[in-house]
Amino acid sequence: MRIFDISVPVRPGMHVYPGDPAVDVERVLSIAAGDGMNLTRAGFGLHTGTHVDAPLHFVDGASSVDELPLDALVGPAIVVDATRFDGDIGPAELDLLAIPSGTTRILFKTRNSRLWERDSFSPEFVGLTPGAATQLVDRGVQLVGIDYLSIAPASDPAPTHIALLRAAIVIVEGLDLRQVEPGEYMLACLPLRVAGADGAPARAVLWRD
């Protein structure tokens, strides 16, 4: 069995979505400095790197990240190759991807993955249009993920998020799929259990025999 870590390392200077807090990681105790242990403090937004959006992120009063169903976060998933698309993914593009009926967890591998190689955030990423989001809702999808910091187009992020989150579809953003071939996998993506939060960083892995 091979396990693929599809999480982005959390580190100072990493890409963050505009308006989100920058990442600050500081060693506050150090054995080398004569302390009895190494101890690190970290500060960053809960939508940093690889993270899960809870419905509360865009729907006031909805479920928080600690209330997400675990069965949506672990199970069979498909990585679909959407690297051919230069623009956002709408219903027509979804049809071209020929995603098998009954698929409940979908990870979109797009040209976004190469954006992680840049020195700073790029707004030129591929997202899902509201029409594509509605189509995924109609298909009964439980979880949808993408390989950059937003599932939605940068020009108008709210409608896509709202369509998915109102239907209680788990959104995973900030995946790194550069080393993953399209196909069927098992997925585990568990966000930190931050009480009452609208999202949380997660360690996401894929595996298959």
Image (cartoon, grey):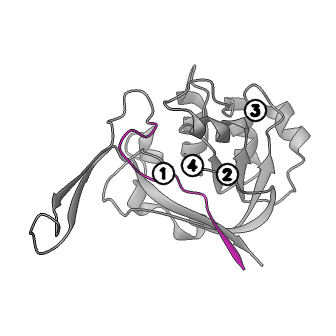
Q: Closer to the observer: label 4 or label 2?
A: 2
Q: Is residue 12 magenta?
A: yes
**For numbered disc 4, what is the local secondary structure?**
strand
Disc 4 to disc 2, how far (Cα)?
A: 16 Å
Mark with earlier residue (2, 1): 1
Q: Residues within 10 Å of mark 3 (few under 14, many from 20)?
A: many
Residue visible at 59% across and 38% down?
Answer: 117
Residue assigned mark 3: 89
- Res. 51 mark: 1
x%, y% of residue 108? Answer: 72, 46
- Quadrant location of the C terminus in the rendered image: bottom right
Q: Residues within 10 Å of mark 4 (few under 14, many from 20)?
A: many
Residue assigned mark 2: 177
**For numbered disc 1, what is the local secondary structure?**
strand
Residue assigned mark 4: 171
Disc 3 to disc 1, how far (Cα)?
A: 21 Å
Disc 1 to disc 4, how far (Cα)?
A: 8 Å
- In the depicted structure, whether residue 135 falls above or below residue 28: above
Q: In which quadrant of the rendered view does residue 126 lie? A: top right
Disc 3 to disc 4, how far (Cα)?
A: 16 Å
Mark with earlier residue (1, 4): 1
Give left or right: position of 68 versus 30. Answer: right
Image: magenta residue range: 1-15
Give left or right: position of 3 versus 59. Answer: right
Mark with earlier residue (2, 3): 3
Disc 2 to disc 3, how far (Cα)?
A: 17 Å
Disc 2 to disc 1, how far (Cα)?
A: 14 Å
